[in-house]
Image: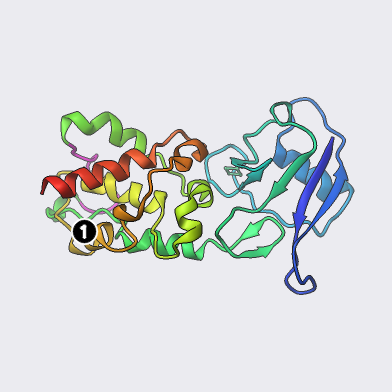
Amino acid sequence: MIFRVKRFDPTCDRRPSWRAYTVDVRPKMSVLDGLFWILEHADSTLSFRYSCRAGMCGSCAMVVNGREALACRLRLAHVAAPVHVEPLRSLPVIKDLVVDMTPFFEKYRAVDPFYRAEDPAVTGPAAAPAVVRPESRELVDLQLGCISCGACYSACPVVALNPEFLGPAALNRAYVLSADEREPAAGDRAAAILGDGGVHACHAVGNCVAACPVGINPLLSIQLLRKGATDR
Ligand code: FES
């Protein structure tokens, strides 16, 4: 199977270029397995990021045939050839398929993503499970599963056009915390949610929903944050 991988080494390349490799595909191989095949048999200089190889850590998020995916979870049997593999969008490329996640996590931090209960007895690692309004319990459980892979951030056209926009993952985290009744109304978080880069910058395109590899709906979180702000 032909793999076309976008390569870029800032120490010697002026711009990215596509390089083709013929990968010896075996049954049940994933895109990540294909990249390992290239590394071991064709080009030991190829760089990519991974850790768990089980779809849990989010490290291997990249763009495969134009769509964001976790390379370790995407089977080659479900991918059309030739397979085009490139790094996540809207993030600086460190080398080849490895991006600098700093802008993503800076925006994540801007929504004060840490749980801070008013009651100190329930803070810390042994904190009690989130207490949410009963009607939002199921949704919060779902939205809590974000693995911070950056796929939604890469797929979002507003992120690409507006550097101020916090992005789907950060705003989804803000929603999860705002739905927890133990949380005091955090001033910094509220300011970030309603600021220039907050929920009102979202154009509701919905690419984030399609891109999320773990089934989260960040657009719904953003809409609920907007509704909450309007209600207040
Ligand atoms: Fe952890 Fe793919 S290596 S999600």
Residue 55, image quadrant: top right
Looking at the image, residue 89 lies above or below residue 70: below
Task: State the image coordinates of residue 111 (x, y, percent, origin top left).
Answer: 31, 59
Task: State the image coordinates of residue 132 (x, y, percent, origin top left).
Answer: 19, 37
Quarter of image, ligand 1: top right
Q: Nearer the viewer, residue 112 or 223?
A: 223
Task: State the image coordinates of residue 135 (x, y, percent, origin top left).
Answer: 18, 29
Secondary element at tag 1? helix
Residue topped by disc 1: 190
Q: Residue furthest bottom?
A: 11
Taking the spot 81% from the left edge, 50% from the top edge, the residue there is 39
* Quarter of the rendering occupied by the N terminus: top right
Which range of residues does the magenta coloring cover?
123-132
Q: Is residue 49 left or right of residue 112?
A: right
Q: Residues within 10 Å of mark 1 (few under 14, many from 20)?
A: some
Q: Is residue 170 left or right of residue 128?
A: right
Task: State the image coordinates of residue 228 (x, y, percent, origin top left).
Answer: 18, 45
Q: Tell me, yes or no, if residue 28 can be seen here.
A: yes
- Tell me, what colour scheme is on the image? rainbow
Residue 209, image quadrant: top left
Q: Nearer the viewer, residue 170 or 231?
A: 231
Looking at the image, residue 161 lies above or below residue 219: below
Q: Nearer the viewer, residue 139 or 50?
A: 139
Taking the spot 71% from the left edge, 46% from the top edge, the residue there is 85
Q: Is residue 22 left or right of residue 36?
A: right
Looking at the image, residue 187 lies above or below residue 4: below
Q: Is residue 5 magenta?
A: no
Mark 1: amino acid: Ala
Q: Is residue 100 left or right of residue 143?
A: right
Q: Is residue 129 magenta?
A: yes
Residue 108, image quadrant: bottom left
Prevailing secondary structure of the magenta residues: loop
